[in-house]
Image: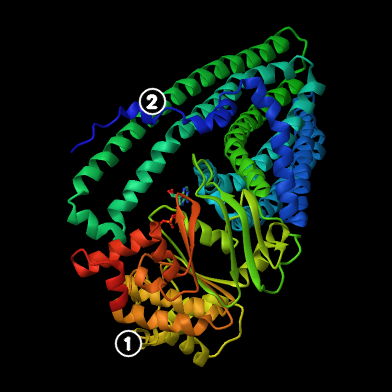
Amino acid sequence: MAIESADPADDLAVPYWLTATAEAASASFGRMVRRLPGLLLQAWRLAWRTDRRTTAVVVVGNLAAGVASGVGLVNVVGVLDGLLREGPTPDRIRAAVPSLLVMVAAGAARTLLAAAATAAQGRLSPQVYEAAELRLLELTTRVDLATFDDADWRDRMQRARDRGIDAAQRVVDHAIELGTNVVSLAAAAGVLAVLHPILLPLLVLAVVPNFWAAVRSARLGYRQQLRLIAVWRRKWMLSELLAERDQAGELRAFTLQRYLLAEVRRLLDAVTREQIKVSSAQVRTNLIGHALGALATGAAYAALLGLLLTGRMDIAVGGAAAYAISTGINALTQVAFAVNHLYEQGLYFGDYESFRALATARSEPLDLPPAPAGFETLTLDGVTFTYPGAQRPAVSGVSLTIRRGQTIALVGENGSGKSTLAKLLAALYRPDSGVIAWDGADLAGRDPDSVREHVAVVMQDPTNWPLSAAENITAGRHDRVTTQAEIEAAAGRGDAHDFIVELPRQYQTLLSRHFNDGAELSGGQWQRLAIARAFFRDAPLLICDEPTANLDARAEHAVYGRLRELAAGRTVVLITHRMASVREVDRIFVLDHGALVEEGTHTELTATGGLYAQLYALQATAYQGNETSVQTLDHKM
Ligand SMILES: Nc1ncnc2c1ncn2[C@@H]1O[C@H](COP(=O)(O)OP(=O)(O)OP(=O)(O)O)[C@@H](O)[C@H]1O
């Protein structure tokens, strides 16, 4: 069935969660100018924090170059005055030489200082990028897991990463560019103000239209980015599906290529149309700015001519003024461009900074006391957890007790909250209400990493780390000094050793087909590796979320046997839909819609005829292929 496509124009509406930024982008010209000092301050802080010495060289170098340029300009008057005075040519040249020498020296000094500042900027800029990226990554790794389930947060993170890091570097570059040109402009303006008071306002007038055009065009660009971000994200997602290896098989099996391609084309068409529209608007704006700027420049030169013709200005001063006006217009135009770029990048940098603030607010605190070194009793009391943006809790008012050395199972239908509860036990999520305690000590006020130190998790969907087979195991406790024998022992317990030794480079084989010589594993082999990793972690609390979902019968049998071995002295939390595997456990907790509805041993629960008994009977029936009773199956298994 084909689903009718929405109007692509809908894709260009500013997403509702972006309205705050959209407001920023539609800010008035005045607001934009008011924003500049703040931006400059941010750029300064960023650069200063990154490398003080280099920042100082950039600032001092540019300032001194500006002063040298002013000295050069002032001396133009002396040179022209000498050359244009009455008298024989040798005398006039002699009169001009001192100013000429100063002018040449100032020009040379300006070039050298500017080169030193540019070289320093070349060192500073990549360092700012590195610092900005690292700062962001450090923060994102400190944010608690639940935050990653918040779609708004993920969007903001994407914006901060896609453009924000780059913008941090560019904000510094453009702030330096702005500073450099403001110094040159100040030198020209200073000279003009000295030469004649009317010249300075004329200079400013000449550049205002270009300035306006530059800023307006930056805003048009940013607003376009905002409108397109949701479309880009969808397009990226679909392009990945079309081009990635993991999806290539299913894509072809369902002959989805043309369907997805059509969707990508629709989105790209919308993007292209929008880009053409905005680029025409930008060209129109710039044209108007340049035309008005040219008129104003003409007016400045006409005024200068008027001053000369009416004898209110000396010819030498007039020559110097013409030179200063041209230098000033050049500097002002550069200032306008720098402001434009700074403002534009400042908008993206604003995304970076606001994301940083958000991530800091959602980071796990660093200075909490550590968790106890272990537990005899793990208790949950009224634990409730709701995913960000979800309508109802995934785990609701769960109270239970687990003792050290016990193997317990969490059972329930899809979506009943088992994995969420397991993640709460592993301190990956924090309960919204209720208490998780080790021997009565509430873990809420403890450093979550110190809790996780005592936990090993086999996730339902373990990550296929693109590392070597050995590293995939030692990642379980990457900071432990280990031996090959220990790695092989963990691999053996996870039933992974036999297939690893058959890989081209055994334990050193890189497990990723994205690289040359890399090998790919089957789903079951990846799962065995995840189990080996958990064994290697050697933690007192082992949480296995469907650890054998991809395993063949023989491997499943072997893994459960090893889990039972490992359980001695440890606590094992097992989540599985294979009911036969939970019969042996010490205690079974049955979840339904996030609530704990039954608990007991297999015998107790089958006797009550509740949800557990029903689920067990259903599976037993499926195995038997007829209406076999639970008791009969029990007998057989
Ligand atoms: N990351 C998430 N963000 C929002 N809701 C989620 C998230 N993960 C799970 N849920 C919701 O929370 C509820 C419990 O999910 P959970 O994965 O804990 O169930 P489960 O019992 O482990 O299911 P299964 O047997 O299918 O693995 C479900 O309604 C699910 O849709």
Estimate how packed mark 2 is, as few (under 14), some (14 to 19) or many (20 or more) residues with alpha carbons within 10 Å.
few
The location of residue 395, given as percent across then percent down, is 52, 51
Q: Mark 1 points at which residue?
A: 502
Residue that appears at 27% across and 39% down: 263
Left or right of residue 540: residue 312: right
Left or right: where does residue 469 sit relative to residue 246? right
**Mark 2 and mark 1: Cα distance apart in space:** 59 Å
- Amino acid type, callout 2: Lys
Closer to the camera in the image, 362 or 226: 362
Q: Going by the picture, which residue comes out furthest to the bottom?
A: 485
Residue 403 in sight in this render: yes
* 80 lies above or below 55: above
Q: Which of 612 and 167 is in front in this view?
A: 612
Q: Which residue is drawn at 60% across and 15% down?
A: 296
What secondary structure is found at the residue carrying circle 2? helix
User: Mark 2–mark 1 contact, CB under 8 Å?
Assistant: no
Q: Is residue 79 visible?
A: no
Secondary structure type for disc 1: loop
Q: Name the residue under label 2.
A: 277
Q: Residue 66 at what x, y percent from top left?
A: 75, 39
Return the residue nearer the eye: 395 or 505.
395
Quarter of the figure with residue 364: bottom right
Q: Residues within 10 Å of mark 1 (few under 14, many from 20)?
A: few
Placement of 599 over or under 524, stated as above or below = above
Instruction: Judge: label 2 CB < 8 Å from ligand 1.
Output: no
**Kind of residue indicated by mark 1:** Glu
Of callouts 2 and 1, the N-terminal one: 2
Q: Does the residue labelled 1 lie within 8 Å of ligand 1?
A: no
Name the quadrant of the C terminus.
Answer: bottom left
